Image (spheres, helix red, strand yellow):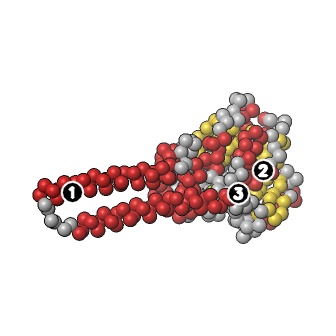
Amino acid sequence: MLLSVVVPCYNEEEAIPFFHEELKKVMEVFAQKYPEVTFEVLFVDDGSTDGTLTVIKDLRANDERIHFISFSRNFGKEAAIYAGLKNAKGDYVVMMDADLQDPPSLLPEMYEAVTAEGYDSAATRRTTRKGEPPVRSFFARCFYKIANKMSRTEIVDGARDYRIMSKKMAEAIVSMCEYNRFTKGIYGWVGFKTKWISYENVERVAGKTKWSFWKLLMYSIDGITAFSTTPLRLASFMGFFFTLLAFVMIVFIVVRKLVSGDPTPGWPSLACIVVFIGGVQLFCIGILGEYLTKTYLETKNRPIYIAKEEE
Ligand code: UDP
Ligand code: MG
């Protein structure tokens, strides 16, 4: 039984040594409890600009279970996850962050779920957002609410990418070769029976988060457009609503003119209406543009990542 641990890393030279220590402890626990399991640790270096790759190579020199793929540049975590799943050879694959925010100590419980309890996958979610700026938590909550209203694919609030899955599920995810990848949605889309394990948020052990508020906002828009076409429909509905409104207003003005011959000019209100409708139109064109961009990028058929070095 081979268990692949996939670790996306982007500028994690400080965190990887801590991570490796923790992982070693868990591998020892496994050696005692589940002697049938052998490990493969696949680091995906997502074009790091610091010494991440050197740190990984040093680890590999002492431990032949460690493998790595190094990208030619930073392709983003989604690409790193894809590369990891594609190259993992294990009967089970587990995704884990390098910063120890995904506690390796949960691994035995997750392994138990997929082997003994008949699940295809065991995923984790954090119950709190401790240590996160309140504004970010607020917007994150809003995102999950909106995304789930708009999309039929379930996107679980607080879900981490930390999960173990069977080879079947990993293959299903790799078979989705779209360029615009939103893993949280992809996990939901492929289905499979998933056990959810909750834990309290842990702060990263070293280094800095790679996500700024702006990046998260852009990512959330990508997430919604990747798994929902509701915004397009919203644009149509708005168009329909305003056409109706305009019709009612025309009737109103004609009738008023006939009844009272009202000559009141009303320029300010007219200006407001023009600006408002103009705004709505631009907004709708923007929505169209979002989808067009995605279509454009997909049709280019570019590779999701480019590996420079692999061992
Ligand atoms: N990561 C990556 N490529 C990126 C950004 C992040 O592979 O472009 C990795 C990063 O090294 C870490 C994981 O994805 O192992 C999660 O990143 P981070 O801790 O910055 O995100 P957060 O936990 O704050 O959501
Ligand atoms: Mg993190």
Q: Which mark is residue 254?
A: 1
Q: Which residue type does callout 3 highlight?
A: Ala
Query: Which element carries disc 2, helix, strand or loop?
Result: helix
Residue located farthest toward the front when viewing the structure as drawn: 258
Residue drawn 59% across the image and 62% down it: 293
* Quadrant in the picture for residue 156: top right
Q: Which residue type does callout 1 highlight?
A: Val
Quarter occupied by the C terminus = bottom right
Measured Cα–Cα span from mark 3 to mark 1: 60 Å
* Quadrant in the picture for residue 152: top right
Q: Foreground: 290 or 197? A: 290
Question: Badge 1, how many Cα within 10 Å: few under 14, some, many 20+?
Answer: few
User: Which residue was labeled with disc 2?
Assistant: 86
Q: Does the beta carbon at disc 3 come under 8 Å from ligand 1?
A: yes
Q: Foreground: 166 or 28? A: 166
Indicate the position of residue 251 as horizontal and vertical percent values.
Answer: 24, 53
Residue drawn 69% across the image and 38% down it: 121
Q: Nearer the viewer, mark 3 or mark 1?
A: 1
Measured Cα–Cα span from mark 3 to mark 2: 10 Å
Measured Cα–Cα span from mark 1 to mark 2: 66 Å
Indicate the position of residue 198 as horizontal and vertical percent values.
Answer: 59, 40
Residue drawn 21% across the image and 57% down it: 254
* Quadrant in the picture for residue 18: bottom right
Q: Nearer the viewer, mark 1 or mark 2?
A: 1
Residue located farthest toward the left when viewing the structure as drawn: 260
Query: Which element carries disc 3, helix, strand or loop?
Result: helix
User: Which residue was labeled with disc 3?
Assistant: 79
Q: Are marks 1 and 2 in contact (CB under 8 Å)?
A: no
Indicate the position of residue 32 as horizontal and vertical percent values.
Answer: 80, 37
